[in-house]
Image: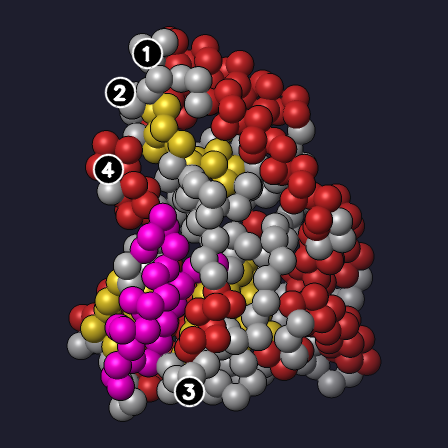
Amino acid sequence: MTYLDYSATTPVDEEVLDSFIKATKYIGNPNSLHKLGVQAKHLIDASTNQIASILKVKPTEIIYTSGASESNNTIIKAMEQFQNRGKHIITTALEHSSIYSPLKQLEKKGFKIDYVPLEKGIVKIDELKKMLTDDTILVTISMVSSETGIRQPIEEIGKLLKQYPKIIFHSDITQAVGKIPFDLTDVDAASFSAHKFFGFKGIGVLYKKENLIIEPLIAGGKSTTAFRSGTPPLELIVSTAKALRLSYQNITADIEKVKKLNQSLKEKLNQYPNVSINSNENSIPHILNLSVKGIKPETLLHSLEEKDVYISTMSACSTGNASKSVFALTNDEDKAKTSIRISISKKTTPNDIENFLKSFDESYKQLGGKL
């Protein structure tokens, strides 16, 4: 099997699975006052401290959720409580559907949503500054596009928005965590999921600055924080801390490895007349988006699947038959309708790349691709 869909989800690392299994021995509810509960709570606290240390934030700023989608919904829907300050929100055309859907819900309630202009996929910061008004309460911009890999200058945007204390700056950092270094100093809130860096599905994090008080999306009882109720999933929390620690253990070497694999892919794929590489110099090397003219993405995907090779069309959570992200980047509807995503990781091997290229060549010819 050749798996090149790591941006959709990653397999659970064996060491992470081992941490999960060991944590199952702590059977107490972390919110119980007896000895078993206290032991479980201590283990969660240790994991939270580790996650906070890696992200360089405070442990009290970590909120556990079911995943990035819940985290995104939590922070966006919390804007209803701030509407006395304003009802203007700014985002981009490169966001995940779990950003757009709650924004549309707010739009129906009278909020105004604007999209900042992009240049080669990158937010034009001067234009963003011009868009800020006294009514602006939220700017939400993903750190890395899940479809094209475009990496936004979140740190620079954060410095700008720091000059506007009323504005909350949120970033979906799901495709950045465990892949690249970043700085959350000037970010007010950030979302991510563990299953993107070899952790389990069903666990995510909402980082929220200590002084930002929001209404919880899920209310009803004590947890690790007042901002999200529910019995803390000890095993998932412990394994997430382990996955995060492992993902940054050799981050510099891992990035260099992925860069070489990405370059190898681009060199070979650029030789096909009908192939256009959509990801550009602003994309992280883990994501390579391309369009194959004249071949439906689903047809190509299933042809590769028959060869035991797995990629993605658009984002796994996207809707519709054309990629909004690719259109925003290329302004080409045909490319947006024929785009596929190859996503690689530190666990991808040169053999995986070789197998993909061989299978792609066969499928491209079988499906009538121009030579």
- Badge 1 vs badge 2, beta-carbon distance below 8 Å: yes
Q: Choose top left, top right, bottom left or bottom right for residue 107.
A: bottom left
In this rendered view, identify the residue nearer to me: 270 or 307.
270
In this rendered view, identify the residue nearer to me: 332 or 77.
332
C-alpha span from label 3 to label 2: 49 Å
Q: Position of residue 74 (x, y in %)?
A: 42, 72
Give the residue pinned by disc 2.
294
Residue 1 against residue 320 in the figure, above or below: above
| Residue at the limit of the structure toward the front, as seen here | 126
Mark 3 or mark 2: which comes first in sequence? Answer: 3
C-alpha span from label 1 to label 2: 9 Å
- Residue numbers of the magenta segment: 118-143
Say if residue 93 shows up in the picture.
Answer: yes
Check disc 4 and give the amino acid type: Asp
Mark 2 surroundings: few (<14), some (14-19) or many (≥20) residues within 10 A: some
- Label placed on residue 140: none
Q: Secondary structure at mark 2?
A: loop
Mark 4 surroundings: few (<14), some (14-19) or many (≥20) residues within 10 A: few
Check disc 3 and give the amino acid type: Pro
Residue 25 against residue 342 in the figure, above or below: below
Give the residue pinned by disc 4.
332
Say which of marks 1 and 2 sits in front: 1
C-alpha span from label 1 to label 3: 55 Å
- Badge 3 vs badge 2, beta-carbon distance below 8 Å: no
Q: Secondary structure at mark 1?
A: loop
Residue located 56% across and 85% down the image: 210
Say which of marks 4 and 2 sits in front: 4
Mark 4 or mark 2: which comes first in sequence? Answer: 2
Q: Secondary structure at mark 4?
A: loop
